[in-house]
Every structure is written in C-alpha cells, then in structure tokens.
Image (spheres, grey):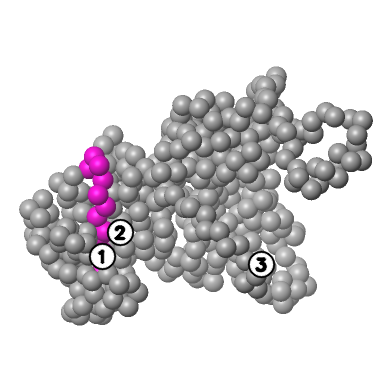
C-alpha cells in the first residue's frame, strides 16, 4: 500500500566514494582486548523514545544506562583494531587482505559486511 | 592453451572459455558466467563480456549491439576511429571501436573471433593511472578457444583446475573465504570449493567437519582416506535409501574429498553427487588437477 511506503529516497553513494570513507569508532563505545586477543565491546543500547519513556516510568529507581556487550572473533578484532579514524575503508581492506592472506575481493566482501554490521549497531561512524 | 604460470608480473586467468594474461597487481572480479570486471587499486580498468555465438560468424555484430543498446537504454552507440594505442590489435582481430559518450570518446571495443565465432565486448573504463597503451597487451592476450579437446582449463583467483569437456559449467559463488564452482556432466553434479584462510577454518573444525558442512552428512558413510591433511569419503546407500532419495529428487550416491594445502594456507574440496555409483577414477582425476597456484 502506498500510504505505508517510505517516501524518503536515501542518498546513495558509489563504490569508489564508499571505499574512500573513513570509519571512526563512536565515542560512546568502550572496548578492550581480552587475553585471547579478541576485542570486547560495550555500547549503549539504542531504544526508541516511546519504549524509553515506558521503561523510565516503571524503572524510576535505577538510572544506570542500558548497555550491550559484543565479543568480536579473531578476524573482526583485527579490523576493529585497525579502525583509527584515519584509515579509509580501502586501507582497511588492504590491511586485512595482507594479514589474512585472502584476495582483495574477498577482503572487500568481509570488511564491508563487517563495517555495515558495526554501523547498524551504532559502533562506528563514517566520515 | 594458456596455462597458469608463476610470474612476478603477469598472471593468466581462464574463465568459462576466455583466457587472458594480466598484470599481477590487477584484480579480476567475476560478475557473471561470461562477464569479468578487471580492477586496479579498487578502480575499474575494463569490463569483458563475451558470448559463444556458434554458427553466427558472419552476422553484423555492431548492428546487433546497437539495437540491443537502443532497446534497453536511451544510449546511442556509434562507431568511432580506433586510437593508435590499439592499432597492434588489428593484426589479430577485426575491431569495432564504439562510443556512447558525447565527443566520440572511445568507450569500448567489439570483435568476433574468426575461428570460434565468440563475440567479445570490452568496455574500457577511465582509470586514473592506467593508459590505453597498458591495456593493449592484455587485450592482445585474449584467447576464446582452446586447442585441447580433452579438458577445459579454469584459472581464477589463486586456483586452477581442468574439467573434462563433457562437463558443463552450472553455477559459482565467490563469497568471503569461500569460492565454489559447480559443474554438471556424465550424470554427475560436481562442486569444487576453495576455503581461505585455512588456519582460521581449521582452528575450530576438522577437515571431516568442514566436508560435512559443505556436503552434508552421509548415510552409510565409508571413509576412504583420513590423514592430517586429507579426508576422503563416499557413501554406500542401501536399496531402500536409494529409492527414498530418488523420490525426494536427490542424488543417492555421494563422494567427497577435502585437503589442506599448508604452504598456501588454503583448503580445497571436491564433492560429487550422482544417481548412479560414482566412478572414482573420474573424480580422482579431477581432484588431482585442482590446485592452488
């Protein structure tokens, strides 16, 4: 039904522009490397305003922020630790391809899918 | 026939009947069964499309392409003058240089092989660091027909294989860490897989577990070889199971081999399924010619 269809057209960018973007870790995110070498991330839970107001109404005593924890695997940890706010997506792909000895095409697929997942959770921003 | 050769500067690729030699730093991306995208430093260099035309050797291919463009887009395609950088190619091909941009800038080259009738279309992209003169040797190396009647040569990424001509190419996947080619022929469904990097894959799974993931668990499994670097198995289904599997429109006979190439940090696997008992000689011969280069 047309009524319920989203009218907004999202601006799309080409592959070249997307690869030139520079990812940076969101300031609200805290992370650490554990003994196994994997990265542990803790990030604030994004709740819709309506749900938040209901939650606040029933939870007046506890004011601490709701967070979620995420543990990255070995490959994810390599990419995450390379995100320094200076390297572009293209650089991250090159580094990942060199470390994991896969082709650039495979590295591009892995890294872009991983960055998309991080972006959905609000863990990184792209500049 | 071109064979993959180890060279610092050039690598040979062979995909679905088309072979060519490229600088090693260029990346080949498979976009379709007859469509390759060639890139350098994440910028497209050129795009190759081809079609094995069979008997239509003498048709006006430019007219066919022009009509096809007019039907699908508003673009008008015109013939242009061949730039001098590509003039050495005229010794080998009858080229039709085409343009669809204002100013008649060269956008593509079109030709038909006089021997096998394959129509090849090369869309040339404007790359910031690669000149037309650098493209000329690559285009000159294109070969669309093979002298060998025994086996078709395939070489892409870092692996190569020879498949008997009786097999036809049916499917492919190029996912992150998994490349898969599928063929069908001689009542056999064949899949050739390459997993990378092997060390990561084997950190949590054994070779037999990886083969089960690729092929599924087998009923009445019979292990033929099981070493640290190779695992081979087949099944011996009883009559009732064969009947049941056939009713489910699946192949009752399965065979699989997976091996670890430690030096290259890759895992290669070949699996086969058939309605009839699998001839191990055929699948062993295919496996022995499937390798990392």
Name which residue lies at 48% across and 53% down.
A11
**Is residue A109 shown left or right of residue A53?**
left
Q: How many marks?
A: 3
* Bounds of the magenta segment: B117-130
Residue of label 2: B48
Q: Position of residue B132 (x, y in %)?
A: 17, 48
**Is residue B48 shown left or right of residue B286?**
left
- Residue B32: image quadrant is bottom left
Mark 1 chain: B
Q: Which of label 1 and label 3 is nearer to you?
A: 3
Mark 2 in CB contact with mark 1 (< 8 angstroms): yes
Q: Is residue A105 magenta?
A: no
Q: Is residue B120 magenta?
A: yes
Q: Position of residue B149 (x, y in %)?
A: 32, 65
Q: Is residue B248 above or below residue A82?
A: below
- Quarter of the image with the N terminus of chain B is bottom left
Name which residue lies at 34% across and 39% down.
B41
Residue of label 3: A4
Q: Secondary structure at mark 2?
A: strand
Mark 3 chain: A
Mark 2 chain: B
Mark 2 in CB contact with mark 3 (< 8 angstroms): no
Residue of label 1: B120
Task: Tell me, yes or no, whether dots 2 and 1 are on the same chain.
Answer: yes
Q: Is residue B147 visible?
A: no
Q: Callout 2: 10 Å neighbours few (<14), some, many (20+)?
A: many
- Quarter of the image with the C terminus of chain B is top left
Name which residue lies at 91% across and 34% down.
A60
Instruction: Return the residue nearer the eye: B34 or B8.
Output: B34
Residue extending furthest top?
A35
């Amino acid at each position: 039904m047309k009524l319920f269809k989203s009218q907004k057209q999202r601006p799309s960018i080409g592959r070249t522009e997307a690869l030139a973007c520079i990812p940076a870790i969101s300031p609200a995110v805290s992370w650490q490397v554990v003994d196994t070498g994997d990265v542990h991330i803790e990030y604030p839970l994004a709740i819709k305003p309506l749900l938040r107001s209901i939650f606040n109404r029933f939870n007046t005593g506890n004011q601490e922020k709701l967070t979620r924890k995420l543990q990255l695997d070995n490959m994810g940890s390599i990419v995450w630790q390379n995100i320094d706010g200076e390297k572009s997506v293209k650089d991250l792909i090159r580094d990942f391809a060199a470390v994991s000895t896969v082709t650039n095409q495979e590295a591009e697929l892995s890294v872009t899918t991983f960055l998309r997942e991080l972006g959905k959770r609000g863990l990184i921003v792209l500049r | 026939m071109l064979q993959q050769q180890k060279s610092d500067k050039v690598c040979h690729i062979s995909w679905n009947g088309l072979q060519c030699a490229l600088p090693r730093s260029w990346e080949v991306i498979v976009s379709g069964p007859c469509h390759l995208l060639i890139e350098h430093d994440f910028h497209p260099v050129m795009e190759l499309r081809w079609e094995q035309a069979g008997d239509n050797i003498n048709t006006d291919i430019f007219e066919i392409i022009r009509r096809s463009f007019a039907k699908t887009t508003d673009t008008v395609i015109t013939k242009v003058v061949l730039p001098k950088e590509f003039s050495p190619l005229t010794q080998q091909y009858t080229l039709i240089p085409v343009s669809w941009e204002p100013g008649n800038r060269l956008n593509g080259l079109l030709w038909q092989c006089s021997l096998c009738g394959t129509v090849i279309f090369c869309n040339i992209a404007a790359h910031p660091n690669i000149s037309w003169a650098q493209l000329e040797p690559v285009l000159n190396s294109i070969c669309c027909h093979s002298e060998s009647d025994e086996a078709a040569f395939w070489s892409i990424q870092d692996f190569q294989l020879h498949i008997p001509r009786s097999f036809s190419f049916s499917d492919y996947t190029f996912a992150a860490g998994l490349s898969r080619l599928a063929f069908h022929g001689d009542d056999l469904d064949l899949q050739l897989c390459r997993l990378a990097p092997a060390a990561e894959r084997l950190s949590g799974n054994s070779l037999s577990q990886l083969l089960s993931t690729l092929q599924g668990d087998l009923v009445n499994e019979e292990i033929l070889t099981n070493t640290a670097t190779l695992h081979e198995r087949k099944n011996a289904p009883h009559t009732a199971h064969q009947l049941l599997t056939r009713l489910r429109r699946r192949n009752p006979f399965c065979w699989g081999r997976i091996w670890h190439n430690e030096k290259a940090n890759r895992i290669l696997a070949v699996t086969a399924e058939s309605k009839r008992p699998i001839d191990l000689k055929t699948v062993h011969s295919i496996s022995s010619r499937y390798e990392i280069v």
